[in-house]
Amino acid sequence: MKKQKIFIACDTNNTKKVNYIIKNSQTSNLKIGYKFGLQFFLSPRGRLFISKIKGKEIFLDLKLNDIPNTCGAAINSLKDLKNISYITVHVNGGYEMLRAIKKMARKTNKKLKILGVTVLTSFSNSSIRKIGYEKPIFDLVKKQASLAKSAGLDGIVCSGLEAKIVKKLCKKMEIFTPGVRLIGDDKGDQKRVVTPKQAFKNGATSLVIGRSIINGNIKKNIQKLIKDLK
């Protein structure tokens, strides 16, 4: 049976903690990778640390969002990081931006997969209206997923609540679901949260889990995750 893929969010700027997370999250029951966001990547030793990781699947969560030329140049500046499997971009940057990013990725690192981020899991329908969006989140995610597909991206990042409809729209694309919490864990600043089992049931191909794994006893949290997925 194919192992379920989990990316553990290394949300810290401490390289010692990242080493601790990697060391204590090993398991033969799941396919474990590691996600690095702006907090770690922009820290003094973050980029160098990531460049030296071997034998692990790495997901770089930078959520690029700028004019096409700038984003294409940003991808080019990462061409030395050959160990990166995935990088995120905001779909609301527009079709031209997405195409520029994908074009540069093909040119500089053909193994690099581009994931389009839809509406962040920290948004609710009421909070998204405050920044000018009239449509509900469900409709926005459908529109953004379709745009990412038309631009030739490799995958979509969306809440587990929208994963089912995204799966129907983007059948051959990977679906990454953040905002995942183990059963009984606090939602924190997240609004659209699902359990690991719900996310996979709704169509996610990979989960991104941070606080539920890295806070507390990591080994015990990994075992709880395995149990929650049964």
Image (spheres, rainbow, N blue to C red):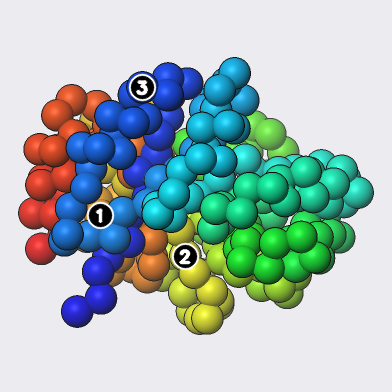
Q: Write down the quadrant of residue 114 in the picture.
A: bottom right
Q: Is residue 75 left or right of residue 210?
A: right
Residue 13, numbered label: none
Q: Is residue 210 left or right of residue 222?
A: right
Residue 196, numbered label: 1
Q: Residue at x 8, y 54 (%)?
A: 227
Q: Residue 103: x and y, percent?
A: 81, 65
Residue 21 visible at all: yes
Identify the secondary structure beneath mark 2.
strand
Quarter of the image that includes the N terminus: bottom left
According to the picture, the residue beneath numbered tag 2 turns out to be 175
Identify the secondary structure beneath mark 3.
helix
The alpha-carbon separation of the residues under discs 1 and 3 comes to: 27 Å
Q: Residue at x 66, y 72 (%)?
A: 149
For discs 3 and 2, the disc positioned in front in the rendered view: 3
Q: Amino acid at mark 2?
A: Ile
The alpha-carbon separation of the residues under discs 2 and 1 comes to: 13 Å
